[in-house]
Image (tube, helix red, strand yellow):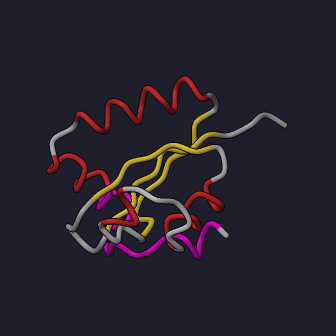
Amino acid sequence: MDKQFYVYVMASKKNGTLYIGITSNLVKRVWEHKNNAVEGFTKKYEVHQLVYYEQHESSYSAIQREKRLKEWKRKWKLDLIEGMNPEWKDLYDEII
């Protein structure tokens, strides 16, 4: 089985602070954010809700997508999230 990669967006609340990341283990990485298991941005700014994610077949495509998303205007990011998750639900329970 090939390894899967994910680009994901965490939020502090609806329209709140956003964090964009990449991982090969989405469940584990989101758990780490939610439980402040690692120092950094999401712990400092209490960014604990998984509001968007997408799967990629290669690390290269995931890294390229993450870089592009980080360059996007905030409005575009909000539109992307609302296209998949209009209610800004925490999607963590759906992936475990």
Q: Residue 91 magenta-drawn?
A: yes
> Relative to 6, is 96 above or below?
below
In the depicted view, which residue is nearer to us: 94 or 45? 45
Give the left or right position of residue 28, taking residue 46 as reference: right
Q: Position of residue 11 (x, y in %)?
A: 33, 65
> Relative to 75, is 67 above or below?
above
Give the left or right position of residue 60, taking residue 42 as reference: right
Give the left or right position of residue 27, taking residue 85 as reference: right
Give the left or right position of residue 29, taking residue 74 as reference: right
Residue reaching furthest to the right: 1
Q: Which residue is at a point 55% across and 23% down the rendered structure image?
A: 60
Q: Which residue is at a point 51% across and 43% down the rendered structure image?
A: 22
What span is in magenta? 81-95
Q: Quadrant of the N terminus?
A: top right
In the depicted view, which residue is nearer to us: 42 or 5? 42
Q: Position of residue 96 (x, y in %)?
A: 67, 70
